[in-house]
Amino acid sequence: MALLVQKFGGTSVGTTERIEAVAELIIRTVQAGHKVVAVVSAMAGDTNRLLGLAQQIDAKAAPRELDVLAAAGEQVSVALLAIALIKRGYPAVSLLADQVCIRTDNKFGRARIEEVETHRLQQELEQGHIVVVAGFQGRDFEGNLTTLGRGGSDTSAVALAAALQADECQIYTDVDGVYTIDPRICPAAQRLAYIPYSDMLELASVGAKVLHSRSVEYAGRFQVLLRVLSTFRPDAGTLMVYGEAPQQPLLSGIACQHGLTRIHLEQASPELTSSMLELLSSRNIDVDMVRTDTDSVQQAEWALANTDWQQVAEEARELLKICQGATLRSQANLAKLSVVGCGIGTQADIVTRVHQLFDSLNIELWAVYQTQTRLSVLMAAEQVDATAAKLHQVLFGSDN
């Protein structure tokens, strides 16, 4: 008998018919002799609908109240799934974050999980219940309701799996695994049976939508076995492994991320650069492609989401006043194209082929960032998808 944490996203529970189908899937797992903790997102579209109501009242609504509102969607979906299971004769109980005791920090809208208590979960499992837990939400040290930000239900599932020492955390979504590229961009996308943790973390952090980077990071911290599966097409999916994957390819995939802003500081002191990054960190805002240069003209640059920059732009410009002569330029609505895999660091011809394609297409690159396992470029948003599809043909059209 295994203990499995199964997470179902908004598309998987988007209608009552789909909730009934998820109930059947869970029951098949239970009939196979396993215990199940199901983590559920809000029904597709519900969170955006709720936040849209707040926007109609106040475009600058208090973050605390937005979290109270946004978390309501999960309360609906967990109750409906529990009802569907009970109707079929399987004892189930729905629990919200405070009933489980999922404790977070107090960064409303993008809180991080700090602790998960397991007493109530273990008690329900011992009584033979299927436990249905609301994803995306937690409680801070003052008892305030918090939400975990984009992809938060994935993180909830991984955190519960880690706390319970579950045998596997299964992320059910509308795709049947991790692909070498988004199949909607390139129909020739190839599904990976296995993916190394380091490559999955890179792909998630640069825009691959199948998993959020924080959930992958959390899984790595506690060595949680993480598998991505389709709710609608039974299959083995993709298993994230630690160490080398069986028959590990040089490249794992290509990812695209839209809606980015590039920030460029000039004549910036190290103190100013540090203050800017501390401001972003204090809001749990993720940044990427960070570069600093202090050899001659002191400068720094990085990329972050348009919406995140809009939240802190005014405060960031205030910080400029502490460094006379410093200038800040921002360029919004860019996109990032990234190639991920161990071959980036060991196979020079791969990087050469990437740049040759950019040159042949006359792609203007606003920034380039390379590590041992990733090559990322910032470029015009309208060019990124077509460029990614052509790059996939170059790199994955034959053995890479």
Image (cartoon, rainbow, N blue to C red):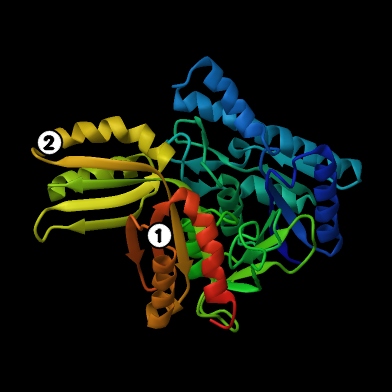
Where residue 197 sits in the image (x, y, percent)? Answer: 51, 69
Quickly name the residue at label 2: 322
Quickly name the residue at label 1: 363
Task: Write the residue at 70% across / 67% down.
Answer: 237
Q: Is residue 158 left or right of residue 362?
A: right
| Above or below, comparing residue 138 to residue 396 in the picture | above
CB-based contact (under 8 Å), mark 2 and mark 1: no
Distance of mark 2 from mark 1, alpha carbons? 37 Å
State the count of labels: 2
Task: Write the residue at 38% across / 47% down.
Answer: 304
**Badge 2 density bin: few <14, some 14–19, many ≥20, Cα 10 Å:** few
Residue closer to the observer: 86 or 20? 20
| Above or below, comparing residue 130 to residue 319 in the picture | below
Which of the two discs, 2 and 1, sits closer to the camera? 1
Q: Secondary structure at mark 2?
A: helix
Q: Secondary structure at mark 1?
A: loop
| Above or below, comparing residue 87 to residue 27 in the picture | above
Please say whether residue 309 is visible from this viewpoint. Answer: yes
Q: Amino acid at mark 1?
A: Ile
Task: Write the residue at 62% across / 74% down.
Answer: 194
Where residue 74 sits in the image (x, y, percent)? Answer: 66, 36
Q: Amino acid at mark 2?
A: Ile
